[in-house]
Each structure stands twice: as C-alpha cells, then as structure tokens.
Image (spheres, coloured by chain):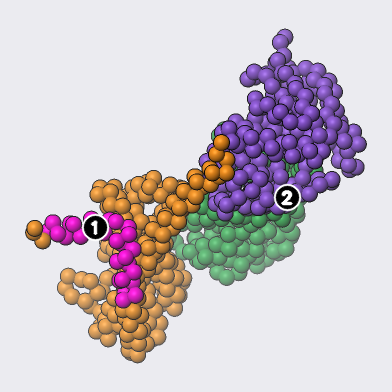
Amino acid sequence: MIALFFRDLKLAVRAGGGAMLGVLFFMTVVAVIPFGVGPDLNLLARIGPAILWIGALLASLLGLDRLFQAEREDGSLDLLLMQETPLLLTVFVKCAAHWAATGLPLVIASPFLGLFMNMNEPAIGATMLTLLAGTPAITFIGAVGAAVAVALPRGGLLVSILVLPLAVPVLIFGVSAVYAAIEDPAPFLPPFMILMAITLFFAVIGPVAAAAALRHSAD
Amino acid sequence: MRLLVEGLSARRGEDLIFNDISFALAAGEALIVTGPNGSGKSTLLRVLAGLLAAESGGLFLEDGPPGFKHPHELSHYLGHRNAMKRELTVEENLSFWQRFLGDAPGGTGTDLAAAAEAVGLADITHLPFGYLSAGQQRRMAMAKLLVAHRPIWILDEPTAALDAGADRLFSGLVAAHLGRGGIVITATHQPLGIGQTQALQMRGFVH
Amino acid sequence: MNENSLAIRKFSALANPTRFLALADRVLPWLTVLTVVCFAIGLWLSFTTEGDYQQGETVRIMYVHVPSAWLSMMCYTVMAISALGTLVWRHPLADVSAKAAAPIGACFTFLALVTGSLWGKPMWGTWWVWDARLTSVFVLFLMYLGVIALNRAMEDPGRSARVSAVLVLVGFVNIPVIKFSVDWWNTLHQPASVFRLDGPTIDPEFLWPLISMAVAFTLLFFSLHIAAMRNEIWRRRVDSLRRQAARNAGRETLAP
C-alpha cells in the first residue's frame, strides 16, 4: 500500500504529471478575478476567501478524471482489482496520494494568493486551515465520479459535472468557517467542525462507493 | 492443488459468449485455449481472473492454501496491456508490483535483477518503460510474473508482440513455472510443447 | 569573402551542438568570474551609498528589484527571438535556448514580484495592488509557468519546440504592454526613470549602483543561460543514448 502511495506520487511529479498544473490553474483562476470585478482592494479583501475556495475547488477537479482512467488504459486497474487486499483500501490510498500531489500544493499556494487578494493575516490563516481540512473531501467525492466515469471515452467533463454539486456542502462550510473567523460575532468552530465531519464522512463513503463502481465497470 | 471449473458461462450485454465450459487442472498442468477471433477466449480468461462475473457455474480451488476465497487472489493475469507505467523506469515498475502484489503462500518471487535476466533484458532496467520497444515491453511484463509468486498464471495472448527468440524464452518461463508445480492457463497460438498440456478449443456460442 | 557572409558562417557553425559545447566550456569560467566581480562591485555600491531621505533604507530593494524586472522582460525577448529562430531559420540550438531560458526567466520574474511586494508594503501599505504594471508582470510570470508546463508535458523535444515557440511568440505581445503600462495608464507604480528619451531623471547617487547591479544581473543571466543550454544539450544526448541502449539490449542474447 505504501508502494502504491509512492508510485502515484512519483507519477504525479514526473514529466506530464498533473501536480504542477493544478497550482498553475489555481493561480490563473484567482488572477483573472480582479479583471472581472475590478481592482478595488476592499472588495477583493471581502470576497477573497470565497474566490480562493472556488479556485481551489475547480483546480482540484482538474486531474481527477485520470485517477482511475490512467490505470485502466495500461491495464493496471485489472491487477489492482484482482488482489486479496480490499479494493476500498486501494482506492483510499490512491485518493491520499492524489490529494498529496494536487490538493496539498493548493493549500500551500493559498497564502500567497491571499496576499494578492489583499486579505489580512487571520483571513489567510483561516482560509489555509479550512482548505487543509476541506480539500481531501473534494478528492474523495471526486474518486466516486472518477470511478463512475472510468470507462467513458470523454469522462473528464462528466466527472466535473457529477462532482461539483456533491462538493457544494464542502464549499458552503469551508467559506462560512473563514468568514466566521474574520467577522467577530460568529464562532469559528461550529462550521469548521462540520467541515471536518464532512471530510471524515466522505473519507469512508467515497472509497466504498468508488470501489463498488469500479467492480461493476470492469468489462 | 487443483483448479476446478464447472459449467462456466458468460454473457456480455445480451449475448451469451460461451456456455458450459468445464475443466480441471492439477499442479504442473497447463491449459491452452485456442479458437478464432471473437470466440470468447479473452472473456473466458477475464472471468477466470475474476474481472468479469460469470453468468452461471464457477471456479473452485481444491487443496488450496487456507484463507483465500477466490482463485483469482492466487493468480497472475497478463492481459493485452502490460500494466506498466511509461513514465517510470522498468525497475520502479517491477519493484512497485513486487511490493504491492506480495507473495502468495507456497513460494517466493525472484528479485528484480534475476527476473530481468530471465527475460533477457538484464541491463536496461534503469530506463523508463516508455523507451522500450513493444516486444521488450512485453518481455518486461512477463518479468512481472516472476517478481511475485502466484501459483496460477492466466495469460492472454502473451506472445503477440514477440519474435521467434522471445517465443522460445516465454516457453521456457512457462515450463519452469509448471515444473515448480504451477498452473498455467493461456490463450496462444504458440505450442508450448512441454509438460502436461490440455487444449480447449473455443468455438463461440451459436444461438 | 566579405565580412557579412563570414558572420553568417560563424553563426551557422554554432548550430553544431558540439561546437557550442566547446565554446561554452571556454566562455563559461570567464563569464562566471566576471559576474562575481560585477556583483561584488554592485553590492558594495548598493550598500555604501546614501539611503533616500523619504524611503530610508528600503530604497536599497530597488537595486535588486529593478534589474530583475528588466531581466524578466529581456529573458522573454530572448525566448521570443529563439522561437523565431526555431520557426523561421530552423536553427537547431534555438529551441534549446528557448527551453533553457524559460525557468531562468520565471525565477527573475518571481524575484521581481517578491522584491516589489516587500518594497510595496512599507511604501504603499499593501503587499499587492492590481495596477497595470504589477498585473502584467504577474501575467508574464504565469506565461513563463505555462511555457515550462508545456515543455514538460511533451516527450519529443523536436515537436514540443515548435508548439511552445508558437505560444512564446503569441505571448510576446505582453512585453510592450508591461514596458509602457506605467505610461499608458495612470498607476501607482512609478514611471520609468532610467531609460528615457530626455535622459535619466534618477539621482546619480542611485544611478551608479543600479547600473552596476543591472550589468551584474545581465551577466548572471547569460552565464546561467549558457550553462542551462549546455545541460539541455547533455540531457538530450543522455536521452538518445538511453534510447539507443534500449534498442540494442537483448538482441544478442535472443538471436536465433
């Protein structure tokens, strides 16, 4: 299992891997927002956390469709399916590796983009913390979409369409936790706890559902 | 150890691909599946590997090691695709599969260098898999069968991209596996010519 | 033989990567020494001259910020010329040059952005504003990263060279936009004060350290660029040797 984790990390970092592309996309999305809404720093500071969250959500959807499709194309998926080790554990490890390669760089890049959005230090810290807690949930939800769409020739777009509605709760509680942290009367912890609960919930449900979908997609 | 297959039939969509196939293989025996294109050879092998559900019938293991419910957990499957990553080196690929697959009870896999030596490509394991020619890639995929021990080998057209020399090499690998008491089920046009071989002629299912 | 055709002959002789490697071996040590000397002079001048009466010590950031910003644009210009070389003259070293320049340019752009940000905090009270000059430099940075990602995504260097050359040339429109953004739009960033038609407006006290740092940075760029080109040529040779090794492997053992 550790071998699988490190193989997936290596593949993501090697030439043609998606690790850097996600961060680049994140930066680009965040960079075009001020062109749309105008360079008003106060406005940007107010909507900054939401923009970072939406950017991170879109960026983490990018490489998801390849999660199982790449394995299927070269036949590795067959071998992963045949083993005695539970498939849901395999799926969980693949999700963890995918998050470490694409989600974690987004979390690390978010403070710099927060500066571009003129956010103050508590807002940047809260955004980073909520992204750290919330992006794994997006990966786990995405694994279900990727498993469902694994056999489809143009699955990439479909995965995004399937996953985005499911990821809405993550976005809601992630953003509301950040605003709770920077606006005094609202407490930070309740929405943040719910966010973590969502992540833990999908960490269980996601691999189970994805494993079931993979079993039935074999042909 | 014996592998028993009883009354196996499989369906793809609405079509029945094959019907009521039965055979039994003891340790050290091989089964060669032949038949024209579309007769269901690949489907049969995928059902045996547990990748497709059988419509009826089943496969069982007699005197197998305890704790394994399905024969496919004790099987290697080499399909049309090699299950190796082009971006990683041959060594990284093989060592990943060695660690991920682990050894089935009753044997140990050979180390990477010996496995690469056995397919005649000992000195290029440091190269990315994508640099290799189609035939070399196929031979490295066979080396994958050696690095982790599995008593049952299920091979789908293993010699498709190989030249005559590599064909002989493949026969040698299969003979050695049978000699160690393994079971080989293969769809191939290549006569193995060694050991106890049974033949299964697939005709396709006619309604 | 007239002088012009001699120059052309020299230039096309450089097209041979082996000659380029020999030249790089000879030039690189001298260039490195020269770069170090220039940096020593530049840094000594930067830290011994007076601070600004308004900006205090922070004005010294300028001696790193302005040269990196110049180089971020010059590097892209080098890439654009190399891209032309790839597409028009099919010069075999042109795509090596473009590929080697991209990461260096990205580093200088990043340096310009970071030092600008550090300078902006005490001066303007914010790390970042979305003004024309800053935004277009940020876009330049993203373009560098895009070119690097494109170069990495394709295995065959010959094919990726053509494609990224097209991208580089299309992106070149950004350079004049950056250069003149401070004149065209009324922005927070100060207008150019060194390269002007009516002579520099900057105080000579700041001009000399700035010029020596700029020379040092330019030399640094050329040393890095030549070294990176040399590495890229070596990398391609290692690559083709490895492919050759893969082709030759296993032939004799299996020969019937």
Q: Main secondary structure of the magenta part?
A: helix
Residue C17 part of the magenta segment: yes
Chain coloured green: which letter?
A
Rendered position, C139 above or below B71: below
Query: Image check: B125 left or right of A93?
Result: left
Count of picture labels: 2
Query: The residue marked by circle 2 belongs to what chain?
Result: B
Residue A29 visible in rendering: no
- Tell me the quadrant of the picture where the C terminus of chain A can be found: top right
- Camera-side mark, 2 or 1: 2
- Using the image, determine if residue B73 lies above or below residue C229: above
Residue A39 appearing in the image: yes
Q: Which residue is mark 2?
A: B110
Among the chains, which one is orange? C
Viewer-proximal residue, C188 or C192?
Answer: C192
The reply to whether the magenta stretch includes residue C199 is no
Amino acid carrying label 1: it is: Ala
In this view, the residue in front, B2 or C254, is: C254
- Identify the residue at horizontal 58%, vertical 66% (top origin): A124
Q: Colour of chain B?
A: purple
> Residue at label 1?
C13
Instruction: Please give the range of residues in magenta.
Output: C4-31
Dot 2 and dot 1 within a common chain? no
Residue occupying image coordinates x 42% and y 73% = C115
Residue at 72 percent of width and 55 percent of height:
A2
Mark number displayed over residue B121: none
Q: Measuring from the top left, give residue A54's x and y in whole percent.
A: 57, 52
